[in-house]
Amino acid sequence: MAKLERSVLAVDVVLFRVDDGELAVLLHRRAQEPFADAWSLPGVAVRSAETLESAARRALLEKGGLHEASIPQLHLEQLYTFDALYRDPRGRTVSVAHIGLVPLDDAARSAGAWRPVAAVERGSLPFDHGQILETGVNRLRGKLRYTNIAARLLPDTFRIDELQAVYEAVLGRDINRANFRNKLLRIGLIEQAGVKAEAVGRRGGRPPHLYRFTSEGVEAEERDFV
């Protein structure tokens, strides 16, 4: 009987958030060789008694420094399988990468080391993590154009300028505010959810409207809308 070659199954996670108008990714500093002290995506080898998603959440807890209470609320989905023969100098390793999203008001703000995606230099990440990050950004940009996935980067209710900031940070371009709001309202992607009265200053003025997404799940539209 031929002897089976042992390969390692791993997960790496590209966790995004948007804050101060920038798309940021969660990195951690590697403690061991190879590439000790290098900044990398959180990743772990999959244990025999856990699913890929469980391993991805464990990577964010153990390597990413997220608080355990924030892990279950994260949006997490499979991104792509990276199986280049020599992607890991320790031996044959296949990684099922995942993409994760953190809302603006989530406790994960304080976790690990957040870096603006634009500040991560090409070739600076170990293994093939640069390729994984690039793939994650492209996936997020694509889904932002035809789904309501932006909801996973925002609190339950939000101002229209906060929503626009998320779209602009991810897409990397400016958006006309009036056309943007009207289009999203017209297709039923968002709806008004009241006003933020406490935002009115001593000089008065109209309180800003609050909005929310009309669907709790991630759903696709018939065509691109931005």
Image (cartoon, rainbow, N blue to C red):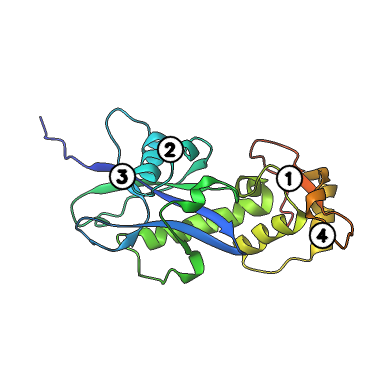
Disc marking residue 201: 4
Q: Could you tell me how far apart the alpha carbons at marks 3 and 1 are, in whole angstroms?
A: 37 Å
Q: Nearer the viewer, mark 4 or mark 1?
A: 4
- Going by the numbered disc 4, the residue's amino acid type is Gly
Compared with 63, 123 (above or below) is below
Classify the position of the C terminus by image quarter. Answer: bottom right
Q: Nearer the viewer, mark 3 or mark 2?
A: 2
- Of the numbered discs 2 and 4, the one sitting upstream in the chain is 2
- Check disc 1 and report the residue beneath it: 222
Compared with 119, 7 (above or below) is above
- Going by the numbered disc 1, the residue's amino acid type is Glu
- Of the numbered discs 3 and 1, the one sitting upstream in the chain is 3
Classify the position of the N terminus by image quarter. Answer: top left
Q: SS at mark 2? A: helix
Q: Could you tell me how far apart the alpha carbons at marks 3 and 2 are, in whole angstroms?
A: 17 Å
- Check disc 2 and report the residue beneath it: 68
User: How many other residues sit within 10 Å of disc 2, few (<14), some (14-19) or many (≥20)?
Assistant: some
Which residue sits at x=20%, y=59%? 34
Q: SS at mark 1? A: loop
- Residue 7, how many percent across, how many down? 22, 42
